[in-house]
Image (tube, rainbow, N blue to C red):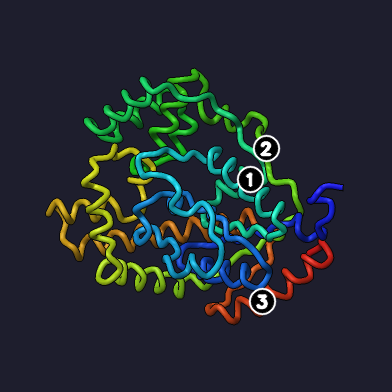
Amino acid sequence: MNTIDKQAPHQQSCVLLAGPTASGKSALAIALANEFDGVVINGDSMQVYKGLRVITARPSADEEARAPHRLYGVLEPDDFCSAARWRDMALDEVKKCQEAGKLPIIVGGTGLYFEILTKGIAEIPRISNEIRDTLRKLQADDGNQIIYDRLLAKDPTMAAKLNLGDSQRLLRALEVVESTGIPLTQWHKTAAEGPVLTCPRAWLALTPDRQWLYDRCNKRLDWMMEEGGAIDEVKAILERNLDPQLPAMKALGVSEIAEFLAKTLTKEAAIDRIKMQTRRYAKRQMTWVRNKMREAKTSSAQDLESLKDDFFPFIRHFLLTGTK
C-alpha cells in the first residue's frame, strides 16, 4: 500500500474558492488553511508574477507567512503564463499537497483558470515567435484598430465578441488564426484536452453585495496609491522596458499609472480610471461566479468571522464524508 492509499479520504480532496476582487478571498483562504491544515494555491492570472504585489492585491508578506502559499510571485514579469501553463503548475502543487497530507485550497478570481483546471482546454498549437512579434509591433505602432480589422476579416465571429479596448484578447485571436489558419472560435469548439483535476472538490464562492464590493475596491485603490506603494511598484516595472503586450503589463492599473508617471494623465484621473476598470472587472467576475459556479456553497457575508461561520461547517462535513 503506497503513501496515498494510507491517507484518509479527505486528504485526496481539494477546495476551490472563487469570488470577485476585494471580496475577502485571501483572508478566508488563510483561515481555511489554518483550520484544515491546508495550503493556499494561487488561481489569479496576475498574482503569479513577481514585482506586482501591491497593484494586483496579492497577499502581503505577513499574510503569506500565516499559512503556506504556492504560485504567488513565482514568475518574472517578462515571462508568459498561459492558462494551460498555470493549470500544469497548479496540478503539480495539488499533487504535492496530497502526498504530504495537506488540503489544497485553490483561490482566485480568474474564471478561465478554474474552467481549464476542472474541464480541460482545447490545446492550441504554439504560436510562432515571428508571428507574435510581428503582430505585437503592429499593434504597438498602429493601435488596436488595425488588429481588429484584420481579425474581422479572418474570424468575424470572435471579432464580434470583442471590443476595440480588448487589446490582449484581440491580439491573441489574431495570432491564433494567422498562425494556425483556424479561427479561435473553431478551436474553442474542439474537445477539451490535457490533464484536469479529478479529486473530490468543494466549491466555495463569495457573492457580496455589489455596492459594498465597489466601495471596498475604491478604498483599497486609494490605499494602494497613497500608502501601499503602487506607484513605485509600477515605476520599477516600467524601468525594465518590458514588452507592453506581456500579460503582466496588462494588470489593472499599470497603464494608468504609467500615463501618470509620463505626465500625460493626472493622478486624480488615473485613480478614477483604475477605479472604473476595477469595478467593471469585479462585475465580470461576479457574473462568472453566478453563471459557472451554481453548484458552489455561497456566502454574501461581509466580514471574515461570518464567512468562517458560513463555510467552516460545510468544509468540515465535506472532509469527513466526502460529500457536500
Where is residue 289? Give x, y as percent: 59, 58
Q: What's the CA distance linking mark 2 and mark 1? A: 8 Å
Residue at the location (68% across, 60% down)?
A: 103
The residue lying furthest to the right in this view is: 1
Q: Which residue is mark 1?
A: 91
Disc 3 to disc 1: CB gap under 8 Å: no
> What numbered label is drawn on residue 138?
none
Q: Which residue is mark 2?
A: 195
The kind of residue tagged 2 is Pro
Q: Nearer the viewer, residue 178 or 51?
A: 51
The kind of residue tagged 1 is Leu
The kind of residue tagged 3 is Asp
- Give left or right: position of 232 versus 55: left
Nearest to the eye among marks 3 and 1: give it.
Answer: 1
Q: Secondary structure at mark 1?
A: helix
The picture quadrant where one finds residue 56 is bottom left
Q: Earlier in the sequence, mark 2 or mark 1?
A: 1
Nearest to the eye among marks 2 and 1: give it.
Answer: 1
